[in-house]
Amino acid sequence: MHQTYMFFEEAATLVNAELDRLVPESGQASAGLEKAMRWSLFGGGKRLRPALTIAAGRAFGADDRRLLGTAAAIEMIHTYSLIHDDLPSMDDDDLRRGRATCHVKFNEATAILAGDALQALAFQTIAEDGTLEPGERIKLISGLGQAASRMVVGQHLDLEAEGKDLTLAEIENIHRNKTGALIAFSAEAGAVIGKASDEGVAAVRDIGKKIGLLFQIVDDVLDITQTTDLLGKTAGKDAASQKATYPAAIGLDAARDLSVEIEAELMKDLGGISGDTEMLAGIISFIAHRNN
Amino acid sequence: MHQTYMFFEEAATLVNAELDRLVPESGQASAGLEKAMRWSLFGGGKRLRPALTIAAGRAFGADDRRLLGTAAAIEMIHTYSLIHDDLPSMDDDDLRRGRATCHVKFNEATAILAGDALQALAFQTIAEDGTLEPGERIKLISGLGQAASRMVVGQHLDLEAEGKDLTLAEIENIHRNKTGALIAFSAEAGAVIGKASDEGVAAVRDIGKKIGLLFQIVDDVLDITQTTDLLGKTAGKDAASQKATYPAAIGLDAARDLSVEIEAELMKDLGGISGDTEMLAGIISFIAHRNN
């Protein structure tokens, strides 16, 4: 585990420096907007998605320099989605990573615009990343666009599902879109930048999809079993707003068993990847056994 | 004038067909979200920005087929910005193009997500446009990203300026970002796709900037002089919310004079473009003399 924490710390340091460069404290014309973007960007996130991109990229021998722009772009999309999801008309959450959410710290209009600006900057960042060949950039922008669209579709399905009894298949469909697509793309992007073969990219994409599923199941379980203090966000929210979750559909114990099963499958899947997959394995273990 | 209306109609028909193809009635996983996207996309907009892209592209001999994806992407960005600007926490408008705004017709969460989805799809559309070379797509995505960022910066500056006395320079700075950047890019994109020289692209970009300025001055004047019925959106809103406008800064007559002056300048600028600029001239006249 120690090595994984070291890797997470290293990946976060690299990505934070890239984000700091891309969203400087007073780079643009509207200081208030940048403050809001930076408030949410540097809110102490785990940088799980960028870590996945870096781990997958390194497994295929990609240079860090070629990975960081895309890793930062993915984190921008993730951060914008958190800002918008927390809004009063959506999940209405005041707390995120132990701090005030963007609309609470600033105001609703600023939060909406900060999210909008982060999304635009994410695509622009990849388009202008001179370390990547034009064909690579286009592939990555296309993939990121698809993942970002699916994320929004998932959030909309999730909101529509509140208070309804869903089947496990319906819940999985929500999460495959809402969180799964971007997590899967995070891993896939590393393989693309590492110039993996089409089969290699497809294998990593499939692993990424399973990682997304694992992440969501554990997230749902933690929402029930942990305190607000430990999570850094409001605990018990899913049940309170009658969200579609795995524990709600199949029970808490079955959800836990499922996460153990998926973790084991993933470790087997990693065997099919040529290259050093140690860091990917570490991330998977971390996701399966995290407590916040 | 007749010829210009014919061109607008032709351009709108072409772009609407492209948008219909890109956002089909039930293409994706969330029918409710698509409905909201289509409600705002097909709300009877003038398609001014796509018309500019097509007119500028044709001036440089570009095939329509190569122009339409980018023209549609620009209209998606414009439409998403209208949806978000109309939200209760922003301009709080119930009426747009004579119909209910997206959050009134659906709900606030759906409107935020429909806007988010349109932004993602805009970038994805250009990335996946096989009629354009990879280098062209990257240049267009980078330019669209910059324009979309500046639009958001401008909207934020505009909100921050409410109730304050601004100088003419401050007002111009807001509008150069809020509406100017995307209008300028709409023209520039046509020149890029038409494979204009760097000087040609720069000349069209400058013309686009002036068109954006002209558009905004006329918009501000119409908000004072026209009725809600004719505008299809709430008239007199700028004054009511103490918005930074040209008439507020320099007076109604001076604002009108300025628009006449800029129109004349633009007609002179068009002389520097080799190629058929008749449709561009028509659009400029239309913008200067429109009454809604």
Image (tube, coloured by chain):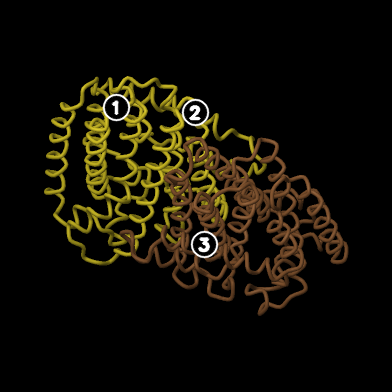
Chain colours: A brown, B yellow
Task: Check the image and report above or below for B227 versus A31.
Answer: above
Q: Quadrant of the N terminus of chain B?
A: top left
For badge 3, the amino acid type reads Leu
Residue B31 image-quadrant placement: top right
The chain carrying label 1 is: B
Residue drawn 58% across and 76% down? A98
Mark 1 neighbour density, 10 Å: few (under 14) some (14–19) many (20 or more): many
Task: Check the image and report above or below for B28 versus B252.
Answer: above
Residue drawn 63% across and 53% down? A155
Mark 1 in CB contact with mark 2 (< 8 angstroms): no
What is the C-alpha distance between the residues marked 1 and 2?
24 Å
Q: How many marks?
A: 3
The chain carrying label 2 is: B
Q: Quadrant of the C terminus of chain B?
A: top left
Looking at the picture, how far across and down is residue B103, in whole percent? 52, 52
For badge 1, the amino acid type reads Ala
B43 sits to left or right of A154 = left
What is the C-alpha distance between the residues marked 3 and 2?
41 Å
The chain carrying label 3 is: A
Return the mark for residue B18. Answer: 2
Looking at the picture, how far across and down is residue A216, in whole percent? 72, 59
For badge 2, the amino acid type reads Glu
Which of discs 1 and 2 lies nearer the camera? The answer is 1
- Viewer-proximal residue, A72 or A217? A72
B262 sits to left or right of A275 = left
Mark 3 neighbour density, 10 Å: few (under 14) some (14–19) many (20 or more): some
- Viewer-proximal residue, A285 or A259? A285
What is the C-alpha distance between the residues marked 1 and 3?
39 Å
- Viewer-proximal residue, A16 or B149? A16
B80 sits to left or right of A285 = left
Return the mark for residue B196. Answer: 1
